Image: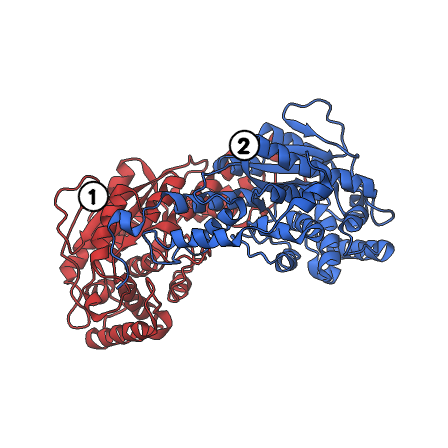
Chain colours: A blue, B red
Amino acid sequence: MLTLDETIEKIRPADRARMKVAQARLDRLTKPVGSLGRLEELAARYVAITGEERPKVPKAAIFTFAADHGVTTEGVSAYPSAVTAQMVLNFLRGGAAVNVLASHVGAEVLVVDIGVAHEFGALAGLISKKIALGTKNFLVEPAMSRAEATRALTVGVELAAEAVQRGIGLVGTGDMGIGNTTSSAAITAVMTGQPVALVTGRGTGIDDRGHVRKVAVIEGALTLHRPDPHDPLDVLAKVGGLEIASLAGLILGAAAHRMPVVLDGFIAGAAALIAAGLQPSCCDYMVASHRSVEIGHQAVLDRLGLKPLLDLDLRLGEGTGACLGISLVQASIKILTQMATFDEAGVSERG
Amino acid sequence: MLTLDETIEKIRPADRARMKVAQARLDRLTKPVGSLGRLEELAARYVAITGEERPKVPKAAIFTFAADHGVTTEGVSAYPSAVTAQMVLNFLRGGAAVNVLASHVGAEVLVVDIGVAHEFGALAGLISKKIALGTKNFLVEPAMSRAEATRALTVGVELAAEAVQRGIGLVGTGDMGIGNTTSSAAITAVMTGQPVALVTGRGTGIDDRGHVRKVAVIEGALTLHRPDPHDPLDVLAKVGGLEIASLAGLILGAAAHRMPVVLDGFIAGAAALIAAGLQPSCCDYMVASHRSVEIGHQAVLDRLGLKPLLDLDLRLGEGTGACLGISLVQASIKILTQMATFDEAGVSERG
């Protein structure tokens, strides 16, 4: 299995020449040229990413990484930290939104404990990769060591590689971690250069006072740590989260294997900023499923050069938006490979 | 079976009290309140429409009505009229985009010849309800008689009723008719009061000169016929299309049976304006699947008070966008009925 550095080194831009080949076929299908809009664009990108000109619909999986955040002791979330572990159990029993939506689109949900502040013991279905019982409170000390950030990244890289070995061809990002919009806003502020107040939202639904506190906590942490935007591992270690680090690794691993990765919302976006900081070419492999209600998400998308497919006022995380995005990727592949051409169907072309 | 007038009379507003009951359940599910945004809104609307508090995922069908348009002799389309019949054959063989996307979401495609300018003879799978070999050229005479418009509407009403009898619980609108964006733009201009130039788009992809001609043809027709916006049948007969009339009937029929109807794009929108003109309460039963590239579509959505779910630069018609909308309706029902509540999952609520 490749190391993190080898993975980063292996990533190449997607094959734009193949995108043109795909578009040429799309233009021969029985529909006005370009009339399926972003579905056509998705199909062409899929071909450019994978190199498969007539792809099969891939097996899909959502990786939902769970971890806790020490910064929650500062009162930045509407829910108690215990919910992270409780939701992991809910995922394993199939009762959460991501289970329902993944099942709807035929995707598997893979739940990874990368840093939940609870000892689950042996638990059927849980992928145990715990690195710590949550991060430290980054208002007073770095969230994690650089070594921990690297290990969490590496877990993501390795899980992407294992998924490919198991025949999965499409992954979606998922996350669970009370407090993780705080970490994501901090990462977004550092990596995009935007003011903290402009990229910090309400998370699970904090009130006005809580929001003021959340902004102040992030500003305090950035003043204390001065994370270096040119050193994504420094940013991850100082104000990141273990699930965010693993998601960044998953993105890099997917890109190294020429596998598209469907991003969920704001947390995925923060992870994508880290991944893109380590290897800009990995952006070619990202599909932005939706625009989150979280106000910082647009700055993330702008920085990554991604246009989201959906805008459904979602702000749940877990990988829920990624599931809906996966359905559109599947649809786009079917359009490319299952429609008749003008010749096959005996349909006249434009006059 | 109910007549058109009885159907219109039978339609009642959706049950808003049940929407609140549904939202109360959605608020008990293991996610932050409101965090699934428009999926929650859809689920609540589905309950209000059908009256089912814990609905099953319904069997879904796309009705694709095909008809020709006499006005194509004025050079308003990029494709020849013969394509309408050719595409009907393509639908029946499963080679068109709507077949692929309907299959993707588990919906059936029902193809109805309501006025194609071609005698198909007996053809397996085709629902033959032909009223005329296309409409007349409405630049020189009314597109059809008032009696023909009523018959086409009634076909839609009856097919909705038959669908309900067959156990279908969700319908999507589809259309095929070279020239039908011209008719739809004329209807939209009349029913919304917008200038023709502001609601007339490129259809299948006409060039600048063709677009100027298209606007002039519609303006000429409206000057000639002066359709009465307060008499939707008058509008349909003078500048409508047979497939548009049937779609308006399908919408009314669905509403009368408390069945949600997922609208495709601009053609569906023009039909919906006619349906809403006949019975304003039928808007409660409409789900707008997407915002079309066709510039007149926004005026339609504004008039109907609908916010589209998707914005994917689609402009194909056939029911393609409706298929994607159906998938979101299905997803919303599954969220409502398959997720665990906080109590069931033992998850803590907000602090």
Judging from the image, mark 2 belongs to the subunit labelled A
Residue under circle 2?
Answer: A167
For the C terminus of chain B, the image quarter is top right
Relative to A84, does residue B204 appear above or below in the rendering?
Answer: below
Q: Which residue matches tag 1?
A: B126
Q: Are marks 1 and 2 on the same chain?
A: no
Give the amino acid at mark 2.
Gly
Left or right of A102 on screen, residue B217: left
Disc 1 is attached to a residue of which chain? B
Q: Secondary structure at mark 1?
A: strand
Residue drawn where x is 47% and y is 51% of the image = A44
Residue drawn where x is 80% and y is 39% of the image? A148
The three-letter code of the residue at mark 1 reads Leu
Q: Position of residue A245 (x, y in %)?
A: 72, 43
- Describe residue A124's horizontal placement relative to residue B23 as left or right: right
Q: Residues within 10 Å of mark 1 (few under 14, many from 20)?
A: some
Label 2, secondary structure: give it. loop
Residue A342 location (% of width, % of height): 29, 52
